[in-house]
Amino acid sequence: MTGLATVPPVFVLLAVALLVAVLPRRVGHGLGILATGALVPWSLSISAGVYHDVTFLGFDAVLLNVDEFSRLMGLIFGIIGAVAVLYSLASDAERVQTAFALSYVATSVGAVFAGDWLTLIFFWELMAVTSTLLVWHYGGKAVRAGFRYALLHGLGGSLLMGAILWHYSVAGTFLFTGDGIAAGPAAILAALGIGVNVGFVGLHTWLPDTYPRPHIAASVFLCVFTTKTGVYGMYRAFPDGHLLIAYMGGAMAVFGVFYALLQNDMRRLLSYHIQSQVGYMVAGVGIGSVLGVGGAFAHVFNHILYKALLFMTAGVVIYRTGEESLKKLGGLAREMPITAGAFSVAALSIAGFPGFNGFVSKGIVISASHYDFKTEALVHVGEYTGLELLLLLGGVGTFMSFIKFGYYAFFHGEHDGEVRDANRGQSVAMVVVAVLCVVYGLYDAALFSILPVDVTAESLAHPYKTYTVPHVAEGVVLAVLGLIGFYATKKPLSKLGRVPDLDRIYNPAVFYGARGLVLGTIRLYGAVDRVAVRTATTATAVATHPERVAERFEPSNQDDGPVTLRAGIGLSVLVLALFVTVGLILLF
């Protein structure tokens, strides 16, 4: 395949983003829907291979690399990109905001279709810039949140850049070789740098801090691209997995769901669940087996669908009621049946209930944690590995969280006043994604056919089968435990206010630390400047009036007259020769 078909889609999408900013609103959004939607057939039809290998600053680089992993990412980015632009149009998003959003989509696409580390880090950093601009555009509290977001992603990008440079010093190339990042310091730096994007515990607070702040349509874009591009980058860096990465994924699954349970702000709750669900993907990459990697990317695909749908339903509630807090909502199912129905599909999908897409992909990762991780697991409890228990616990917490969300937003109590349901454009966007969540849940073969690895292959020790009695029973048991857990904790959870996260510690620490550093630097500069000025003034005075300086060191005797500083020709020549000799020694 040659010609226009092999033009890197990042450049097409960036051009469209520029047009969206200047065209009439409906025309621009329509063009954005077509451009992002075209990424779907393009990803399915383009042949695998390396395209547009170039030389940049003397280094080999590949602007377009197509394999089964990048193809999957392009496919789902195209689907959700088109839906999100439609949702933006229906939700009164400004042209400039959508232009920023499309540039964010474009740079994410550029990153996942990169064929080398140099190209990937280039678009990785542009992705941080475009997403920050998307957040900042909304103004208000989003500006400060966006500033913190930019700082942390700048740190993550710097760590990843350090890893890539170290890798080059070892491997001698930036090109992807299939072996991942070089072991040692490069691997540590890469794990931490990518860990910022995926939301490692301790590096995650940018996520719930930022995503609830901007326009509701901006949140739909933000919940998709950064973290999932991070999972893709994690696989490229660690294609064979790593024990610590797997357990970090398990920790993310539990930590995120725990904090989600404590939230009353709808988008903040959903943001913590991004960390939790990405934990399953990170765990799969860390396991490194066919089941692990296949499950990770199946969950990437499914998570993008149901998480975007959840943010769209929350956005419609905010759009119609103006309320963000679950404490101020209730009884909306009667007045917003389409939104409530879409939420129910998304909630059952993310929780992994049988019949919905999350059940399929989450099940693959849990199976990998059971069958493929026993030899590496640090902890065993009976037949369960420690990682498997963490993922199952995360599943119970997910059911609890979304029972809470649905109960307080849609089914509990009554909402004061009349509330309209989603408008036509919002409804179409939500229904399309809800249908896909059900299709990929009931017809798991449709999902398996687009995965980069075959998780059902008979050659595997434990080929994956979705609808087995033990697997379905596991999903139902997790749901029952989640229901019991919610009703057991409903009363104490309802009394909670805002629960502090780690950012309560390091946001002030960074602020006052940076403030102290700046003030200290300014004061040090001032002190040095004053000393320099005094020294220069004194030197000028000595050179101009040396006899006055000499008078200070001579005994005061008015009868002797003024001090005279004169030297003969011989002494002058000697002093000049001495200075020339010292100068030559210093030069040579």
Image: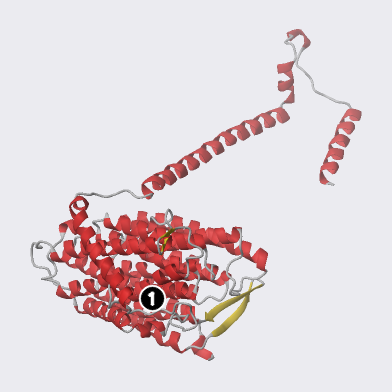
User: Badge 1: how crowded within 10 Å, few (<14), some, or many (20+)?
Assistant: many
**SS class, disc 1:** helix
- The residue to which callout 1 is attached is 301
Instruction: Give x and y (percent) for residue 30.
Output: 32, 82
| Among the 4 quarters of the image, the one containing residue 392 | bottom left
Q: Can you say whether 588 is above or below 540 in the image?
A: below
**Residue 167 horizontal side relative to residue 521, left or right:** right
Q: Can you say whether 444 is above or below 483 in the image?
A: below
Instruction: Give x and y (percent) for residue 362.
Output: 36, 71
| Among the 4 quarters of the image, the one containing residue 143 | bottom left
Residue shown at 67%/72% (left/top)? 58
Instruction: Give x and y (percent) for residue 517.
Output: 50, 42
Residue shown at 20%/65% (left/top)? 406
| Among the 4 quarters of the image, the one containing residue 59 | bottom right
**Residue 164 horizontal side relative to residue 229, left or right:** right
Instruction: Give x and y (percent) for residue 421.
Output: 15, 73
Residue shown at 51%/62% (left/top)? 243
Whether residue 36 is visible to the viewer of this picture, yes or no, is: yes
**Residue 587 horizontal side relative to residue 549, left or right:** right
In the rendered image, the residue lying farthest to the front is: 382
Q: How many marks?
A: 1
Query: In the image shown, does 312 or 256 lie closer to the viewer?
Result: 256
Q: In the rendered structure, which amino acid carries the disc numbered 1?
A: Phe
User: Is the image coloured rainbow, by chain, by secondary structure, or in one colour?
Assistant: secondary structure
Whether residue 199 is visible to the viewer of this picture, yes or no, is: no
Residue shown at 73%/9% (left/top)? 558
